[in-house]
Structures are given as C-alpha cells and as structure tokens.
C-alpha cells in the first residue's frame, strides 16, 4: 500500500495538513518516501486520568499530540520511530475497555480505542508498518523499553514504604519501574540515557540497582569510568492536562 502512495500529491497534502495543525512548535514531517497511513483520536492513560490525544500513523513513525481544536490545532507533538516501538494487546479492565500498550525506550503508556475493531486495526497497522520499516532500514529491533507508569489513582499508599498519600505527602513516579512512590522513597536521581540526558527521579531500590549495574559496566571498561555521584533536586510535573473530547473513528488512507 505505502509504496504507491509515497509520491502522490494527495499524500503530500495530508502530511502538510498535519504539519500545519502542529504549527508553530511542531517539527517538519515531510520526508521522501514517508506516507501517512492513518489518523484517529484515542485515549491515552496519563498519570491522573485518561486524556484524548490525536494520533497519526506514518509508515516509519507515530506522531501524537494534545487536542486544542480538532483538525486545526494540536500541541505537545511527540514523534516515535516505529523501529523503537512494540505494541501489546491487553484484555479489558474495569476502568479501561479496548486497551492496549505502546512500549518505547523513552516512555511506555496505555491506550484505549473506541471499539475492539478499532483497537485491532491500530495494532495490525502498526505491526505491519514496523515490520516493513525494519526490513527497509536494516536496523536491529529495540529490545529495551521503559516501564509504563502506574496511574496515581491505582494506589493510596507508597508502593515502596506503604506510607499513605495525603495533601502533604504527594505522589511521584519512579522512571525506572513506574511505581507510585512518596518523596522520601524517590529522592534519588540518575541518568537513564534512553529517557533523558539529565538525571531523572527514581525510587531508592531502582537507584541502587542501576548504580550497581553502572559500576559493573565501568569495571569492565579500560577507561577511567564515570562519576557515580548523582545530583539531587525536586522534579517538576510530568504530564499536561487537557479537557475531554468525544471519541472519533480512525481514518485509514486507502491505496
């Protein structure tokens, strides 16, 4: 399907429309051979609640962002290379129907579609495009993925020390394991290259594990190693919030 669409005027116009919708802060999406395969509104599980996001599937990347004015204005653009992505089909839960999981090295998150049919369409199209992209790029598939964050409402207590969360005892997330933890159990910061070049918040258990792994890796190298001291600071909020929108059916591009 995608080779026949790659150099068509219709495909170029579709990609240009997506670019305009993310302007002025979005990145350029036009690229030789790139095809817009489909688009649709999905629910993404953020730390506080399910949030509507607009997703665009290309033959080599996934682009998504927050909805300001549907079809006219989106913000907070995220671009995920397909070779760095895997999807997992999940059974329905009490809180989420038609759910599935997107895993990437930098961030993993739960999604919900409007129907089982739409969910399966997203999964099958992503898997097909990913397979074709790996073949054409000749890259090795990514094998290390970030943990999906456990939602705030999933636990009233710290998942490490069991202290109860209050107005003063705020919830935080460990970037390594995704657990909901208190401030005392997540004072440590460490660089996780796949997530950020700057030190990020992790729980004490993960910090010690990562530090031990780094020390073991340094011991195997003949170089001078690296600095094991990790800076400490307070982390800022991790998710933006948007108003709710109705779900809409996905639109797939016909060959």
Image (cartoon, grey):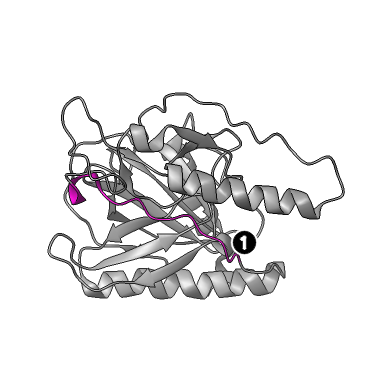
Q: Which residues are magenta?
A: 142-155
Helix, strand or loop under label 1: loop
Verify whether residue 150 appears in magenta: yes
The residue that mark 1 highlights is 7
Note whether 23 is above or below 109 in the view shown: above
User: In the current view of this chain or complex, which residue is farthest to the right?
Assistant: 222
Q: Nearer the viewer, residue 243 or 215?
A: 215
Q: Residues within 10 Å of mark 1 (few under 14, many from 20)?
A: some
| Residue shown at 30% from the left, 52% from the top | 150
Q: Does 193 appear above or below 59?
A: above
Q: Percent position (x, y) of residue 67?
A: 30, 40
Tell me where residue 117 appears, x and y as whole percent.
25, 75
Compared with 193, 98 (above or below) is below
Q: Is 247 left, or right, of 194 in this rendering?
A: left
Q: Along the horizontal axis of the image, is 15 left or right of 98? A: right
Residue 183 appears in the rendering: yes
């Amino acid at each position: 399907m995608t080779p026949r669409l790659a150099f068509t005027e219709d495909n170029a116009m579709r990609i240009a429309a997506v670019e305009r919708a993310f302007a002025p802060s979005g990145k350029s999406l036009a690229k030789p051979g790139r095809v817009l395969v489909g688009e649709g509104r999905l629910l993404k599980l953020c730390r506080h609640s399910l949030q509507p996001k607009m997703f665009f599937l290309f033959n080599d990347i996934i682009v998504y962002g927050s909805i300001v004015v549907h079809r006219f204005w989106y913000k907070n653009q995220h671009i995920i290379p397909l070779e760095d992505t895997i999807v997992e089909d999940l059974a329905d839960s009490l809180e989420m129907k038609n759910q599935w999981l997107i895993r990437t090295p930098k961030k993993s998150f739960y999604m919900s579609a409007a129907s089982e049919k739409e969910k399966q369409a997203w999964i099958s199209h992503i898997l097909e495009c990913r397979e074709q992209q790996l073949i054409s790029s000749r890259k090795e598939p990514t094998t290390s993925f970030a943990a999906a964050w456990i939602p705030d409402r999933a636990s009233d207590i710290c998942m490490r020390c069991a202290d109860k969360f209050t107005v003063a005892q705020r919830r935080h997330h460990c970037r390594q394991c995704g657990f909901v933890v208190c401030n005392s159990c997540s004072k440590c910061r460490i660089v996780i290259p796949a997530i950020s070049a700057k030190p990020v918040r992790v729980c004490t258990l993960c910090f010690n594990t990562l530090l031990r792994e780094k020390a073991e890796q340094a011991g195997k190298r003949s170089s001078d190693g690296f600095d094991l001291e990790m800076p400490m600071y307070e982390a800022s909020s991790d998710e933006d919030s948007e108003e709710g929108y109705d779900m809409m059916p996905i639109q797939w591009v016909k060959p």
